[in-house]
Image (cartoon, coloured by chain):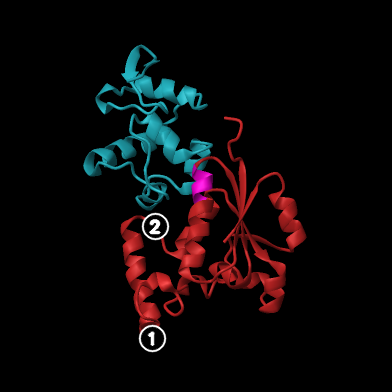
Amino acid sequence: MPQKLFGTATVDVDAEGFMTDFGQWTREAAAAIAKDEGIAELTPAHWKVIEFMQKDFKENGQVPSIRKLNKSGVISTKELYALFPGGPAKKAAKIAGMKKPEGCV
Amino acid sequence: MEDKIRKVSIIISKGGLDGVYPGLIMANGARMEGIEANLFFTFFGLDTIVKKRMGKIKIATVGNPGMHMPSFAGILPGFSAFATSMMKKTMEKIDIPAVPEFIEMVSDAGCKLYACKATVDMFKLKKEDFCPQVDSIINVGKFYEIAAGGQIIFT
């Protein structure tokens, strides 16, 4: 199992860098993963998305889709793409310490 | 990875659900991967972006061997509407939106939408007949210009 050092924490990750143990996730790790993904600073808007995704993941066991984020009033699709440029669902899931999203939409 | 796909231009030419959805899913999926995406609607595929038709796209029940039933059943009145409604329910369950919402989603995701000029002329349509997400009505030459440097997919 590969490991990665994020901030002061060493976490288990898969081949693509997604964390495999959500229990190891910290806000500090999230900020370090975000930097790796080209997001210099996590703003309150980023945190709102991350926190909703984590809550939904705990409740349903699945990474919520972009559509769900939009429909639940958390963030519009346009804003989501602006916050996490170059692949919002994947990047947000990675920063939130979750597995890679599996759905097609 | 040097051989990563950076841009796709997808042509939707058929007007049934099975013609429309694959193109929309591929375009949206491209944007989800950070790939630049364009959608070009032509011939019956144009219904996808015509305001009064986009919500009424159906699955073909006649001459469609994928329906797994004798063709005569498909000609029964209302059968196509019934099959379409069944399919829509299933898709909603797996989080795939209906066509009008899908168009809004893919456009918000940054995909550009274009209508084919030859088809627009043939069906005597005007810019106002299209949903607001449509960028412009373009000819095939302009399409190639827009698609330059990327992959082209015809569906």
Q: Which residue is mark 2?
A: B96
Of A86 and A20, the residue lying toward us: A20
- Hue used for the chain lettered A: cyan
Q: Residues within 10 Å of mark 2 (few under 14, many from 20)?
A: many
User: Circle 2 marks a residue in which chain?
Assistant: B
* Left or right: B125, with A85 as reference point: right
Magenta residues span B28-32
- Hue used for the chain lettered B: red
- Image coordinates for residue B136, horizontal then vertical, percent: 68, 61
- Image coordinates for residue A39, horizontal then vertical, percent: 50, 27
Task: Kindly identify the amino acid type of the residue bearing the numbered disc 1.
Answer: Phe
Magenta region includes residue A39 = no
Q: Which residue is mark 1?
A: B72
Whichever of callouts 2 and 1 sits on the residue coming sooner in the sequence is 1
Magenta region includes residue B29 = yes
Relative to B104, is A55 above or below? Answer: above
Q: Could you say which quadrant of the image residue B42 lies in?
A: bottom right
Task: Kindly identify the amino acid type of the residue bearing the numbered disc 2.
Answer: Ile
- Which residue is located at x 33 percent, y 41 percent? A63
